[in-house]
Amino acid sequence: VRMILMGPPGAGKGTQAPKIKEKFSCCHLATGDMLRSQIAKKTSLGKEAKKIMDAGGLVSDDIVIGMIKAELETNKECKGGFILDGFPRTIPQAEALDKMLAEKKSPLQHAVELQIDDALLVARITGRLVHPASGRSYHSTFNPPKSYMKDDITGEALVQRSDDNAEALKKRLTTYHAQTAPVVGYYKNTGIWKAIDASQEPGQVWKSLLNVFDADN
Ligand code: AP5
Ligand code: ZN
């Protein structure tokens, strides 16, 4: 499959994407995860990105476009297709993606928007726990790990993201509505856009996603 998953912070992109990856044996490329791995490695790009991410802003288009291009070209898992999570987030990013895919003659098949009211996102974001190495996420109330503050699979420690607080969330939402909502509009005109009610419980959101894939087959 070749698809993008859009939606505000906490909509459930990172929760649903691994299930899509498993179903289609494709790659899951999350620009936020890639940037956090640069931060963990303390690269100069990571240091620059951390300030922007903690403030709820967007990292430059050139940087994220370069990261996605490199992965699509070299990541073997992407031979089976891809799911992009958190990219594109600006119109120039969407245009760059179209250009990359046109060159490969492999256009996008689905642009799925996870729709949810902002009011529901605070509880999701402030309760999130993540396993940094894998990007797996949990929620202290909605999806608790089997063992307190430990990843179910590796047993390693779970942490809170530094941008997962109410104040940074407010800025991330403002950024989303100003810069990423237009990207949703961009895909609405293409015929591949579909919206899903992301306020449902995770299993129900997954069922809605399966319907999107079925509708095409
Ligand atoms: P990024 O990592 O992409 O963060 P985000 O878009 O803010 O999205 P989140 O990861 O917060 O939300 P999600 O939808 O994945 O939610 P999740 O499934 O984890 O980006 C971070 C930063 O990096 C950006 O702010 C920006 O600075 C930079 N950046 C990244 N990409 C960029 C780009 N392309 N251009 C420029 N800058 C870029 O779920 C959240 C919580 O809710 C979890 O605890 C989960 O367990 C729970 N949950 C999930 N689904 C449900 C449900 N149905 N019911 C109840 N709880 C649920
Ligand atoms: Zn995410």
Image (cartoon, helix red, strand yellow):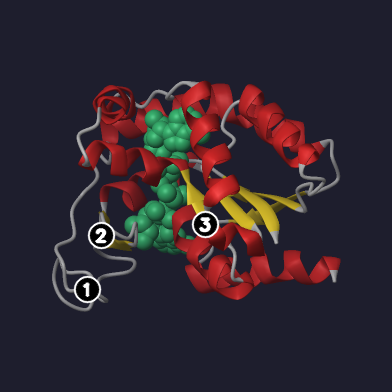
The mark nearer the N terminus, 1 or 3, is 3
Q: Amino acid at mark 1?
A: Thr
Snapshot quadrant of residue 89 = top right
Residue 61 percent across, percent down from the top left: 52, 23
Q: Residue at x 49, y 65 (%)?
A: 18
Q: Nearer the viewer, mark 2 or mark 3?
A: 3
* Element on which disc 3 rests: strand
Viewer-proximal residue among 90 and 174:
90
Q: Is residue 81 left or right of residue 99?
A: left
- Tell me if mark 1 has few (under 14), some (14-19) or many (20+) residues whose alpha carbon lies within 10 angstroms of its own: few
The residue positioned 52% from the left and 54% from the top of the image is: 75
Mark earlier in primary sequence (2, 3): 3
**Mark 3 neighbour class, 10 Å CA radius: few under 14, some 14 to 19, many 20 or more:** many
- Secondary structure at numbered mark 1: loop
Residue under circle 2? 131
**What is the C-alpha distance between the residues marked 1 and 2?**
9 Å
Pointer 3 residue: 28
Say if disc 2 is inside 8 Å of ligand 1: no
Q: Are marks 1 and 2 in contact (CB under 8 Å)?
A: yes
Amino acid under label 3?
His
Q: Quickly name the residue at label 1.
A: 154
Q: Residue at x 33, y 69 (%)?
A: 143
Is the C terminus in the top left, top right, bottom left or bottom right quadrant? bottom right
Is the CB of mark 3 within 8 Å of ligand 2?
Answer: no
